Image: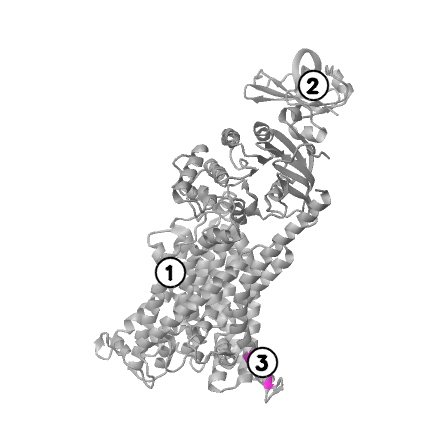
Amino acid sequence: MVTDTDTDARPAGLQVRDAVVRYGPVTAVDGVSLDVGPGEVVAVLGASGSGKSSLLRAVAGLEPLAGGSVWWDGADVTGVPVHRRRFAVMFQDGQLFPHLSVAGNVGYALAGRPRAERDRRAAELLDLVGLAGYGPRPVTALSGGQAQRVALARSLAADPRLLLLDEPLSALDRGLREHLVGVLDDTLRATGIPTLYVTHDQDEAFAIADRVAVLAEGRLLQVDEPARLWAHPAGREVAAFLGYGPFLPPADAVALGWDGPPGLVAVGPTGLVPDPDGREVVVQEVRSRRGGAEVTVTLPGGEPARVRTPVIPPHGATPATLTVRLDPAGCALLP
Amino acid sequence: MTGTVAVEAARGGSVRRGGGHAWVWAAAAALPVVFLAVFFAWPVAALVARGFVIDGAFTLAGVQEVLSSARTWRIVGQTLAQAVVGTAVSVLLGVPGAYVLYRCRFPGRRVLRAVVSVPFVLPTVVVGVAFQSLLTPNEPLGFLGLEESFPAIVAALVFFNYSVVVRTVGALWSRLDPRAEDAARTLGAGRIRVLGTVTLPALAPAIASAAALVFLFCASAFGVVLVLGGASYGTIETEIWYQTTQLLDLPAAAALSILQLVVVTASLLVAGATRARQERALRLSGNPVDAPLRVGDLPAVAVTAVVVGGLLLFPMLSLAWRSLVTADGLGLANYAALSGTTGQSTVSVWQALANSLATALAATLISVGLGLLVSYVLSRRPASASGRRWLRTLDAVFMLPLGVSAVTVGFGFLITLNRPPLDLRSSWLLIPIAQAMVALPLVVRTLLPTLRAIDPRLHEAAATLGAGPGRVVATIDLPFALRGLGLAVGFAFATSLGEFGATSFLARPDRPTLPVVIFQLIGRPGAENFGMALAASVVLAALTAVAMGLAEWIGPKEVNPW
């Protein structure tokens, strides 16, 4: 188990220590420790059921901790009620208040301020998320993407110390998701609010996070910067979740042209390339992709693997064999 | 800053949080519970206890005597028979009505829905008078010879409860995803088969829940049976009234109250079980779905047209028409007579109307205030199993007044609230409190679905935005509750305005309510008295319909899916 602790520096931002969340007999979060520093965006990446949303809810105070603690700037906030934490949560499906307008939703956290200031701030935030002029609209008339942008503006209006984003883009279709990752990234950088971003989508996590924490079965497997995480996955489970596979024992790797240090080699999506001087492998099937083809082959060790080629073969013309080699840049050596 | 300290802090925090919440719920629940205990449980229990105490000693003799009398079992048989038949006919006619009014689109649908929902809130005495005026010899349907008959009572019960079935089943039907039916059609099922294998099974929880509720209403019907049944037909409810007021036989009345409680508890259990299933099903459904009328809808349309025209509108219109008939031809003489005092009573009908309005207003304030508290507590979703058990119990407890004889409540008030510590005998508040108890379950049933529809994550979202518990209630729960509030106020006001069972016991001779005066009027001989009863009934019915219409107009049209 990995712990992400930095004991030397004076604690600033969020510190989660040995957090445990239980639902009856089920342990959803099992002793997780994680930091989010000032201005930092940390993505918690995990499959569904990995406990990532439970962790986020525990940080927000929406779920009681069965063990461990949550700290902010060195102060224990474990017993602080949700509404006094100033940790704003953006939910997967927005959870906009249906009886309030867009401006009413965004201004919800600004209650108590003078009306003019509230309106001005709401307009400012709507502008920030690209929805200038949407204030008077009913939230029921918004599209999914617009609703999530209003939810983001609403969270920002609370002037939170920490943003907690719970799969904010999962309910949207792919094109919109890619666009909104950009909007989110820009907004988070512009505001500089530390953020915990929970997602099951690897691309989203890599696109947005300063550091990515991989969570499985309630435990942290690895916390690293995206490039380091990709290049040096801490183990086979992390590598498989990131999209690596197959995993080749040293002998099989060498047979495919591996000249790096010996060890278990994780083959990434671009780790196997066609090469006339490479090893001949049996082709199982060929599928057309945009801008090329994906060839499924059987490696000498018997493992199925995929090779991307820039050539789109004519339909039905499946070659019997292909010569391939490992590209070290697309592979990772597992410890 | 060790791990142990952190863990301790975490535990302390979560305990404080949970403890604080539980305290708030308990406080919110306490007031209605105390109210229910003092103004419902205590009077009813006191009355029932009288059945077991004769000359200061505990005895089962009184109860045994009642249970061994043939008359009791004839009454029980009649009660069950009329409830079973009334329920069956209501469901058989109501299901096609639900289809036509909630699944089909046609001009005038909203008006028709309003027409259908009027009878449910009409005062029972008024309905009794309306049917009576049709069935007495020499009247339009007098040739049927149905005066004081079983079919007449069943027809009146269906008149009341048709809208219960239409509304309950229609609400679910309008949200049923049509794609399940489409799928069955593409698999080769004809319309009849789709209805039998897909649609009706999906509607079963709503139908069962409506049937249980209608059974409850039919089994405890009082005013309408008292007016229409005459001497030959009675129910447990009218028998309790007869035994207490006419024979002053309290042990017999108490024994009958216990019998009634058994019947009511059984049907409440069935209703509760089916309602839980239905609310789950409703959450799964999407937006209201309807389609223009098609040729295949003809049978359902025909049935609905006959019911609405023949069973609902005809008695209502006939009542209005007959109220204009006087000895000298058509005129307003019956209405003019309303300002005079009636018989030996010292108040005019208009004065009685003023009493009714004041009483109903007070009763509405009480029942809606309590209803808001009760539904707010009942709409919570506690994490712990024991918390959920408590809520289920509370839910059932607040449904009890729906079925416990209003007569029992009224008489119980007389024997318990007449001495210190609570001497309300001379307080005019006694009647509003009794009426509020009768209306409370309806208020709760109306408010609860809107409050339960609030996604708990909306509360969470508000809390993470910095809203404390009080602000969450004010800004999230209250706006949602207001959507159902108009309808709840309407039900409370209409129910109180027409309440007869309890009020007939509690109303003082110098301050009668309108239903009490109407009942007195039809008990007196003479065409003038009957004419005044008709006119007064029209006034009361119109007032009820206007109040209900206003409430629905102020409140949401239908509760919107958001």
Of residue B362 and residue A6, the one placed in the foreground of this image is A6
| Label 3 with label 1: CB-CB less than 8 Å | no
User: The disc labelled 1 sits on which kind of residue?
Assistant: Ala
Question: Is A60 in front, or is B188?
Answer: A60
Q: Which residue is mark 2?
A: A282
Please say if A88 is above or below A178: below
Seen in the image, is B101 located left or right of residue A65? left
Q: Earlier in the sequence, mark 3 or mark 1?
A: 3
In the rendered image of this protein, does residue A223 appear above or below residue B250? above
Chain of the residue that carries numbered disc 2 in the rendered image: A
State if disc 3 and disc 2 touch (CB < 8 Å): no
Q: Secondary structure at mark 3?
A: helix
Q: Residue farthest to the front?
A: A10
- Tag 3: amino acid: Ala
Q: Are marks 3 and 1 on the same chain?
A: yes
Provide the chain ID for the residue under circle 1: B
> Which quadrant of the structure image shows residue B386?
bottom right
Q: Which mark is residue B551?
A: 1
For the residue marked with disc 2, what is the amino acid? Answer: Val
The label number, if any, that marks residue B49 in the structure image: 3
- Gap in Å between the C-alphas at discs 2 and 3? 91 Å
Between circles 1 and 2, the one closer to the viewer is 1
Q: Which residues are magenta?
A: B46-53
The residues bearing labels 1 and 2 have C-alpha atoms spaced at a distance of 77 Å
Q: Examine the structure image and report whether residue B48 is included in the region drawn in magenta.
A: yes
